[in-house]
Image: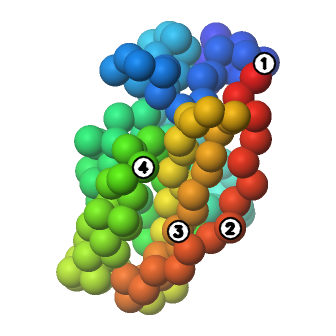
């Protein structure tokens, strides 16, 4: 991102929602870190993009983000977002249904959803792999300490 160093982003990024507040994750990154930079990316014409990764702080926008990711054709798409723990299954079902009912979704499509939860003792991650037919499988992910 123009004017934003990787170290600045890494040091400013909060993992999971701030405890006890409605402030979204990464709210302190500044405007430059919030913009969608895909249109600014320059990729050599002989490269093949095989994965797209999207980080959505506001889980209420996750469905819109998944719809956009599905427009990118076959291949791996990854969404990282932060729902309430008790809503995880509902979100997985909703994303699977989006894939099943979307005309033209390639059976080669893979959507990996990574949910982050800030809990006592550190960050807990949960992952789901949804294929182009809307079939879901849980993915084992490591959790780290929220330092």
Specify the color scheme. rainbow
Whole-Å distance between the Cαs marked 1 and 3? 29 Å
Question: Would you place residue 83 above or below residue 71 in this image?
Answer: above
Residue 24 bears which disc, if any?
none
> Mark 4 vs mark 3: which is more N-terminal?
4
Q: Quick check: 142 left or right of 124?
A: right
* Residue assigned mark 3: 128
Whole-Å distance between the Cαs marked 4 and 1? 30 Å
Rendered location of residue 62, percent (x, y): 33, 48
* Residue assigned mark 1: 7
Q: Residues within 10 Å of mark 4 (few under 14, many from 20)?
A: few
* Residue assigned mark 2: 140
Question: Would you place residue 24 above or below residue 53 in this image?
Answer: above
Whole-Å distance between the Cαs marked 2 and 3? 8 Å
> Mark 4 vs mark 1: which is more N-terminal?
1
Which callout, 4 or 1, points to the residue nearer the camera? 4
Residue drawn at (62%, 70%), measured in percent from left and top? 139
Is 60 or 121 nearer to us in this picture?
A: 121
Dot 1: element: helix
Disc 4 and disc 3 in contact, CB within 8 angstroms: no
Rendered location of residue 101, percent (x, y): 21, 80
Disc 4 and disc 2 in contact, CB within 8 angstroms: no
> Mark 1 vs mark 3: which is more N-terminal?
1
Rendered location of residue 125, percent (x, y): 61, 51
Q: Tell me, yes or no, if residue 66 can be seen here.
A: no
Whole-Å distance between the Cαs marked 4 and 3? 14 Å
Disc 4 and disc 1 in contact, CB within 8 angstroms: no
Dot 3: element: strand
Residue drawn at (46%, 80%), measured in percent from left and top? 136
* Residue assigned mark 4: 85
């Amino acid at each position: 991102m123009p004017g934003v160093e990787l170290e600045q982003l890494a040091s400013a990024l909060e993992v999971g929602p701030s405890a006890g507040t409605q402030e979204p994750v990464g709210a302190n990154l500044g405007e430059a870190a919030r913009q969608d930079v895909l249109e600014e990316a320059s990729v050599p014409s002989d490269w093949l993009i095989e994965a797209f990764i999207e980080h959505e702080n506001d889980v209420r926008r996750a469905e819109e983000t998944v719809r956009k990711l599905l427009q990118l054709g076959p291949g791996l798409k990854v969404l990282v977002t932060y729902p309430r723990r008790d809503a995880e299954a509902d979100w997985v079902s909703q994303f699977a249904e989006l894939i099943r009912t979307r005309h033209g979704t390639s059976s080669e499509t893979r959507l990996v959803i990574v949910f982050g939860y800030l809990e006592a003792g550190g960050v807990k991650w949960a992952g789901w792999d949804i294929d182009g037919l809307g079939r879901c499988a849980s993915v084992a992910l490591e959790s780290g300490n929220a330092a």
